[in-house]
Image (cartoon, helix red, strand yellow):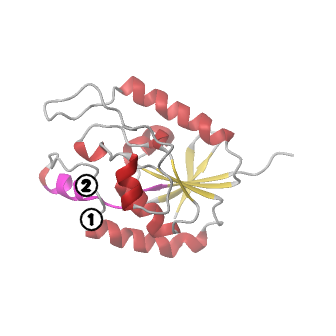
Amino acid sequence: MAVSRTLFLVRHGQSVFNAYYAEHGRDPLIRDAPLSEIGRQQVEAARAKVGLLPAPDVVISSPLTRAIQTSVGIFGPDRVEISALHRERVEHLCDVGHPPTALAGAFPGLAFDHLDDPWWHDEDRNAHGVAVEPLDVFAGRVEDFRGWLLRRPEAVMVVVGHGTFFHHLTGRPFANCEIARVDLADWSVAETF
């Protein structure tokens, strides 16, 4: 008998990049942008909704700071696992991460030693010196992530990640700190919280 599996996606809270870009329409050139004050408030509000969800067996977070802050802020550190496979598509400096040793210092208790250095796309630089991940490479990574998730043994999985990645995964945009249950049969959003 097949085990019932449930997947929730959570986009990170508003980052300082998101706040600046919404106001000014340009990249503020902030590497690995952390949560803004509004983002921290969104995480707090999302934590209050966790009681509506079944308890996760694992929380899989992107290694970008805003996703880790969201993961730990909503679910605590105990079940958080870091995976670079669903990191954001590198288009801006905020999508360029930090080395695993720096992340381990910033987030003690979480494991980063399995990550490559660099674990983000680091080729094809734009005028600002930011590597831009080609769309075909990105699309391949989205497909790899789908397969990776489907092979996992956990019954209830939460993935904390990024807007562009989740849009390509599900076919719809996500608001900051939106929580969505995804139908694994067709990767559509079944409900939101």
Secondary structure of the residue carrying numbered label 2: helix
User: Residue 121, image x and y in percent?
Assistant: 35, 33
Q: Is residue 14 visible?
A: yes
* Quadrant hosting residue 90: top left
In depth, the one of 100 and 155 nearer the eye is 100
Whether residue 18 appears in magenta in the rendering, the answer is: yes
25 vs 113, left or right, is left
Which portion, as a residue range, is magenta?
10-23
Q: Give me the C-alpha separation between circle 2 and circle 1.
A: 8 Å
Is 51 situated above or below 135?
A: below
Disc number for residue 36:
1
Kindly check if marks 2 and 1 are in contact, taking CB atoms under 8 A apart as contact: yes
**From the viewer's perspective, is the residue at label 2 or at label 1 nearer?**
1
Q: Label 1 is placed on what type of residue?
A: Ser
Q: Residue at x 63, y 62 (%)?
A: 56
Q: Residue at x 15, y 57 (%)?
A: 23
167 vs 58, left or right, is left
